[in-house]
Image: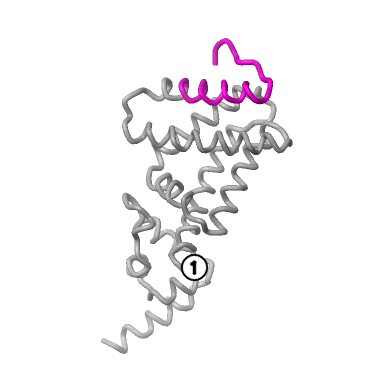
Amino acid sequence: MTRRSAPANRTATRLDPAVRRTMLVAAAARVFEGRDPLGVTIDEVAKAGGVSRSLVYAYFGDRGGLIAAVYRQSLDLFDQELGRALDQELPDQVKLRRLVRRYLLFARDNRAAWDVMLAAGALHHPLVQAARRARIERIARAWGDEPVDRLLARSVVGTLEAGAQDWVDYRDCGLERAIDVLVRVVWEGLSGVSDRKIPAEV
């Protein structure tokens, strides 16, 4: 049995590094589902990926690096959604409403990815923080290129993350009602610091 298992092990080690990394990220995402990623061990991910824990360490450095990799995968999926919401040709209030909708729908329809995004947001890992900054800057550019736009974008992201989390946790109001509430909270705050007029109806 030892002789039979050896070729399989050698074959596994010959996988292209990018393919192996992708497989391990997918395995980690499965293990994270329904759990706090910060409570998952490298051993669990190694077992799910059918590799040794040393190989997981070799690819990701530590648990923070592994969480960051899964986070980046989740963020890429979310960024595709944001790209459709942040059309530069639309009025600010329309872009904001689309942004709020994307946050709520993504949190509802991609719960595992959403949980990883929130957990990773509290992780002070360079890759995580760089990815969060990039998303905030992308949202800021949809409104302008002044430093205040970055400040506003970061505040909006914090509000929408908290609001979306509450909505998916309790679901005690409908989607459109939740969107209306968050749009008004965010828009009125924006109008107070950027001289934008509050729309009569959003």
Query: Farthest residue in the front direction?
Result: 193
Tell me the colour scheme of the image: one colour
Query: Farthest residue in the top direction?
Result: 200
Question: Helix or strand or loop: what does disc 1 sit on?
Answer: helix
Q: Is 171 situated above or below 110? A: above
> Is residue 152 in the magenta section?
no
What residue range appears in magenta?
Answer: 180-202
Q: Residues within 10 Å of mark 1 (few under 14, many from 20)?
A: some
Is 135 left, or right, of 147 in this rendering?
left
Q: Is 40 situated above or below 116? A: below
Give me the residue at 31% from left, 25% from top: 172
Is 202 left, or right, of 113 in this rendering?
right
Decide whether the magenta segment is chiefly helix, strand or loop: helix
Amino acid type assigned to the residue bearing label 1 in the image: Phe
Looking at the picture, how far across and down is residue 186, in whole percent?
54, 26
Snapshot quadrant of residue 136:
top right
Give me the residue at 34% from left, 61% from top: 40
Q: Is 131 situated above or below 140? A: below
- Number of marks: 1
Give me the residue at 43% from left, 64% from top: 63
What quarter of the picture does the N terminus occupy? bottom left
Q: Which residue is mark 1?
A: 60
Query: Farthest residue in the left direction?
Result: 1
Snapshot quadrant of residue 163:
top left
> Is residue 199 in the magenta section?
yes
Is 40 left, or right, of 184 in this rendering?
left
Depth check, front residue: 145 or 10: 145
Looking at the picture, how far across and down is residue 155, in whole percent?
56, 35
